[in-house]
Image (cartoon, rainbow, N blue to C red):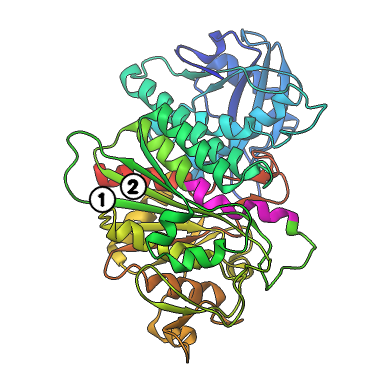
Amino acid sequence: MKFDLAIKNAAEVETDCLVLVVVDKGDRDKPQASVLSAEKALQDAAQELISSSELTGKALELAMLHRPVGVKAKRVLFVGGGRENKFSPNDLRKIAGAAARHLKSKSIRNLAIALPSSVHFHADNAVRAAVIGVLIGDFDPDTYKSDRKDQRIDSLTIAAPVGSDEKVLRPALEEGRIIGESQNFTRELVNEPSNRLTPTILADRARKMASETGLQCEVLGPDEIKALKMGAFWGVAQGSDEPPALIVLKYAPAGAPAEPVLGLVGKAITFDTGGISIKPADGMEKMKYDMAGGATMLGAMRAIAQLKPKVKVNAVICASENMPSGKAQKPGDVQIAMSGKSIEIINTDAEGRLVLADGLTYARTKLGCTHLVDAATLTGACVVALAMVNAGIFANDDTMYERFEKARHQAGEKMWRLPLDDEYRDMIKSSIADIVNSGGRYGGAVTAAMFLKEFVEDKPWIHLDIAGTAWVDEAKPFIAKGPSGIAVRSLIEFVRGFAA
């Protein structure tokens, strides 16, 4: 996709379609639609639609005009932004995505988005949101369809009001491109079927991305994993014919301080059968997405390498399959983690926390990470608690949580903090080992987080349970059904916050 910035009246922009935001300035009982543009030609174009109540400003409402008077665009698409007093960059991102998806379905390849002239946020945030939204909206998961339609957006122009500062907006446009493309990179990985994305292939994709962006990349195979005494990781991997891979990426920019060193750890189970504690067949095909946490960290690192914040960041992606076989670990087995802790295996389908345990230990002890974040499609219990709306956040340090919360808000992603009270520790005690890998039915997302907490020691740490939000089960106007790329944007902003 090509991107351009036009600092001129939006009515003067020549394009296949000009996208304009319409908000509701009225009260609850009496909507009052208003175009967020000071240009008379654009306000006049909307007036008949507003008068006939075809345009009310309702969120993601769409109405199109062809060749309106005084406008050089072939079409104008009005998109509802909801209540004006609540309008945010996140709403603009959804509007841009909805516009892209609507227009590409009609084989319209080029569009321009008019930046709102009266908004409650900075213009650079608006530019980033619009670019990210169009990129996310342009993605479709139909990779392997033999009759795949060539529907895509070829070019996007951001039309900024006359007098806008190009020195501020052009870098914002480039940042939006990097972030949106990196989120889509994550989505492309998560979308791959497991026969086309084994741990080995995932490692190859990571190497290629690292080479393109200037990251250091090292991949450790079965022999190195066993030599490091990663018994928890190896216990999961031993049941599969596909060899595991520990993917390590390093970003160390010149001039960065010695500390902090941020560690991003991702679960990358490229297919999860549940192992001996096998899952029901219904819906198991979706378990190709169980590597979304690892893909999230790869997408975040891709963006970090290009945005170049002055802070050291390492990523550890634990890639494996979880398969039932004569070699697979069994309920009742005891594994010794890299940290030396012994783990009684209660349920082999609680495997994600096992690979993350050794990944967190590796980041802490071998890479010198001072602050840790992990992401994983970890528990169905988190889906029960938060549905497909919010990802779960756990934190052992309030300052770390506040940093991440600020980044999450900037990124416009929905997450909710869940508890880590000491009482939950009793639920993972074992009579034969130090801990069990499953605390049972109740509080499953919390006990999984408590398990991981055992391996971060005293390091500030955030755990993201993205099980309910890494996959979109039903398409929305602004995003296709399939992988979402959740947490990539939040992690990018989190890292940039340390650099700031």
Residue 8 position in % (x across, y down): 46, 11
Q: Is residue 344 above or below residue 265?
A: below
Cα separation, mark 2 vs mark 1, equals 7 Å
> Horizontally, is 330 left or right of 357 in the view?
right
| Residue at position x 75%, y 33% in the image | 144
Residue 132 visible at all: yes
Task: Give the extent of the magenta segment.
Answer: 285-296
Task: Using the rendered view, name the quadrant where residue 480 is placed.
Answer: top right
The answer to whether residue 165 is left or right of residue 337 is left
Specify the quadrant of the image occupied by residue 32: top right
Q: Which residue is at 76% across, 59% downward?
A: 283
Q: Secondary structure at mark 2?
A: strand
Query: Helix, strand, or loop for circle 1?
Result: strand
Which residue is identified by label 1? 261
Callout 1: 10 Å neighbours few (<14), some, many (20+)?
A: many
Residue topped by disc 2: 314
Furthest-bottom residue in this view:
431
In the foreground, 329 or 57: 329
Q: Amino acid type of disc 1?
A: Val
